[in-house]
Amino acid sequence: MSSSESQDPAAAAASSEAQVSKKAAKKEAAKLEKLRRRQEIAAASAATANLSVDEEDPLGGNYGDVPLVELQSKTPSDVGEWTRVEALGGALENNSVLIRGRAQAIRPVGKKMAFLVIRENGFTVQCLVQAQPDTVSAQMVKFAAALSRESIVDVEGVVSVPTAPIKGATQQVEIQVRKLYCVSRAVPTLPINLEDAARSEVEIEKALQAGEQLVRVNQDTRLNFRVLDVRTPANQGIFRIQSQVGNAFRQFLVSQGFCEIHTPKLIAGSSEGGAAVFRLDYKGQPACLAQSPQLHKQMSICGDFGRVFEIGPVFRAEDSYTHRHLCEFTGLDVEMEIKKHYFEVMDLVDRLFVAMFDSLNQNCKKDLEAVGSQYPFEPLKYLRKTLRLTYEEGIQMLKDVGVEIEPYGDLNTEAERKLGQLVLEKYGTEFYILHRYPLAIRPFYTMPCYDNPAYSNSFDVFIRGEEIISGAQRVHVPEFLEQRAAACGIDVKTISSYIDSFRYGAPPHGGFGVGLERVVMLFCGLNNIRKTSLFPRDPLRIAP
Amino acid sequence: MSSSEFQDPAAAASSEAQVSKKAAKKEAAKLEKLRRRQEIATASAATANLSVDEEDPLGGNYGDVPLVELQSKTSADVGEWTRVEALGGALENRSVLIRGRAQAIRPVGKKMAFLVIRENGFTVQCLVQAQADTVSPQMVKFAAALSRESIVDVEGVVSIPSAPIKGATQQVEIQVRKLYCVSRAVPTLPINLEDAARSEVEIETALQAGEQLVRVNQDTRLNFRVLDVRTPANQGIFRIQSQVGNAFRQFLLSEGFCEIHTPKLIAGSSEGGAAVFRLDYKGQPACLAQSPQLHKQMSICGDFGRVFEIGPVFRAEDSYTHRHLCEFTGLDVEMEIKKHYFEVMDIVDRLFVAMFDSLNQNCKKDLEAVGSQYPFEPLKYLRTTLRLTYEEGIQMLKDVGVEIEPYGDLNTEAERKLGQLVSEKYGTEFYILHRYPLAVRPFYTMPCYDNPAYSNSFDVFIRGEEIISGAQRVHVPEFLEQRAAACGIDVKTISTYIDSFRYGAPPHGGFGVGLERVVMLFCGLNNIRKTSLFPRDPLRIAP
């Protein structure tokens, strides 16, 4: 990936609401502490209030807060006695079911009726708590109405099929509640409301047109309360898509004879050079965190594994605070022997990603819809055979519309975006490969072109105009590698065990590294990489 | 896992791998000297080969491939290559092109040389025989002058010899017509593959016969890991490890688990303890996660229901034993439970039985390769995994005279002993021990409902050594604060974690598995460094 990155106007605008100065961060921390204390008091009050309800009611055993002792594995579980909300349907009419989920909405109607919407894994069902002699007490209705949103409840009741469609729930049945227990009570006032967090910009704008001001939850607040934020349908969708990306990646590579490896993140010195490394003391020795598994995966090729891949964290101590950079992200790394040409690596990228996109489109329809509901995006356009352009061809396309790139220079974010637009217009694809980059802007281990050493056997891959992959053929000759390292200002002593690994017979090889969070971000047309990192780490954030 | 661990007698087996800092420095100087010698030898070899080409009209049939040819000059038709594995009788009289390592080089006079070429563990014998107009004596000389472990491209005709070929896996021979060296290895390797691949049995047998064969010690192997991992056993170990990861994932995905990636860079020090690596994070103190524990629990609070993660785990312990590393690969699982922590143990049971079945079915060749060098008995496991309580285990030990302090943790020796007793009594080397004393478990562990001195927790063992720690977790924030305080943890440092339980937290539990330990113990190996590709321990941070 590009080591230097200027913040472009679009990125600045998109990230501005998420930026926060250190002073403001401290202020925020104090605010959080205050809020936390208030929540504790409220929780204690709620607990006290509920105690009194139980004492008065002969039907008190049908509802209430579940005491901790019951939740300490007191009774063996028959998981079969539970019904998943997803499974609730007309076929279960008049059956008694037991479900566990979150109280997403609570709406009392008078003193003898209350509606609850219970959510489990994104599926919701409407539950009716209606006072009835000998079955449901008025106190039980009161208990239901007094629940706090996002509390976890166990509901036992009878399934009924209403005549009219149910708008506020996914399941088109209703549960007539007979028993209602609170397993875990949420604080009465949540720091962010799920309804607000799940709202799309379209809804906000529409409401604004109608003169109503709806809450917009900003990115930083979302991250501060990540365990609430990720409960939204879009966020659940994002991380299930991410899980499937990893699965598709692995399954494809295993099918192609690749072996998964795990390389160390703690390394001596500083791999690949550069100042953007996290440093630490390792048992009295200076050490740092790997910026990629690059050197070790190449050593694995020298160790005769032939084809390897790794999925793991990558650490970059850059000060880049942009929409697409993180200090820690998940790398999907591949390395393989080649016979003759670095196109063999690009061939693999092509097939891997077409298979991955097909897999996502087939297996993640619901998740993609959930993301699209909040963050509307067009499905990714990709070709059955991935387009390949040379760097020079790309530069020429930019020149033709008046965008000048310095000779042998790297493309900045703006230029990459522009080129992405041009490629889409001309070739109809938002996924393409740009190869044969100038050697000067590639890492020291990159193999120069046989016919012109100013260029290299390297490539980047783009989705919607943003880079997701850097790859190349590697230098496998130790003497040449030493020259290249020296030319790039790297002290060869610090990487001697890496260079030595090529002295015992080293096959021609190449590979690539993919940013997992970027793949998901761009596939779903999202504007901020923090949306696709479960607990993001950037220059201003190391929590939660 | 146990946070305290003294070095037991088995650790003495690792003594050959221990090295003082002074000796380490000496070793480094030795390596530097060796490296310079190799550079000179390489240059000499290159010069020598140049002269050979000039004299031979058939010189185009062999030689060192110049770098320019290896810079993606010509497109590859990968189909023109034949994998060594695929060489068989069906290809008789066919011309094939293979690429592999020159594992053995044996000249016979001046007109014939045998090469054994290895690719992905498969080997084939190649004959370079001088023939008029086809193979020159200079080519034979070139073949004989190759250094072992060089990478060569061989083009030749497949023939089937009358007698079985002992020194190769493929029972065909290649009559070489063209031979190119793609990457020349140094003439003298720091360790020989033949030595590195040798079993203790072979060494002992040779010793009985009065012959002293080289034994490569563990530290030397790790210093030259890229050579060491080329042995059949090491190739097998890491392919088994890859399959463990694959089986783990496929099983969990089939059970509705979602894979997540949690941060390794965290503020403060998770789970307490001094055994953390600390660093400066943009002006803030930070450390490396000792496990994804807190974040995977936060994911459960975030409604993912069932999650797993595979990633590095960092422990700055000074434990230098056969089974500890400073960085290892954790396989972590967390899930909502309805009623009981047995729901988690049920997953462990089914997951590992499926994994062991998968390894036994899909990794036969790899297991054989490991067993050839490091002989082991196949793991004994039951279709439904045995569960014993801690108290039952303690009683079994007491019955044979081993005393454990009340509510104490089991040390390595006791765990080994209990493993033997369980194997004798129940016929299994894979079992679960649960209901550990609360005092020996982390602060987030849920106490038993009927006796708070015990906990809803478990460890899992293979061949008497722990591979898993798991438990039901405390999901009530007030109780969690109490437990943290009782364990001496400043709750301010984990406030975001505790706060995550205030917004409705389901009962949940989970476990963490050490990947390297699973492979080590499944294969009956004696040192975890054998199952870590590039191990990190208190004395090693390279290669």
Image (cartoon, coloured by chain):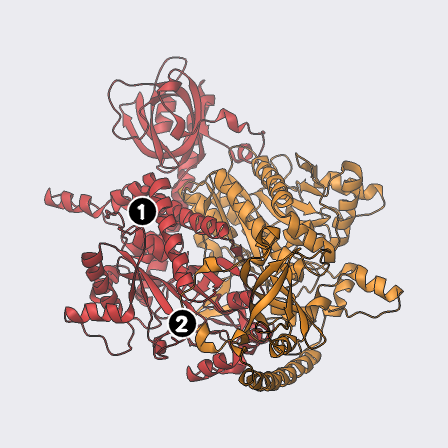
Chain colours: A red, B orange
Label 1, residues with CA under 10 Å away: few <14, some 14-19, many ≥20:
some
Quarter of the figure that contains the N terminus of chain A: bottom left
Q: Nearer the viewer, residue B518 or B30?
A: B30
Left/right placement of residue A96 relative to residue B219 reads left
Based on the displayed image, in which of its 4 quarters is residue A529 positioned?
A: bottom left
- Locate residue B167, reporting x and y percent: 71, 61
- Locate residue A152, reporting x and y percent: 42, 35
Q: Is residue A426 above or below residue B403?
A: below
- Locate residue B182, reporting x and y percent: 53, 72
- Let me know if residue A224 appears in the view: no
- Are discs 2 and 1 less than 8 Å apart at CB? no
Q: Amino acid at mark 2?
A: Lys
Number of numbered discs visible in the structure rendering: 2
User: Residue visible at 37% across and 50% down?
Assistant: A226
- Let me know if residue B202 appears in the view: yes
Q: Nearer the viewer, residue A70 or A417?
A: A417
Label 2, residues with CA under 10 Å away: few <14, some 14-19, many ≥20:
some
Left/right placement of residue A366 relative to residue B376 reads left
Left/right placement of residue B407 relative to residue B249 reads right
- Locate residue A379, reporting x and y percent: 26, 47
Does label 1 lie on the same chain as label 2? no
Q: Which residue is mark 1?
A: A192
The outermost residue toward the front is B132
Q: Amino acid at mark 1?
A: Ile
Q: Which residue is mark 2?
A: B73
User: Residue visible at 30% across and 64% down?
Assistant: A24
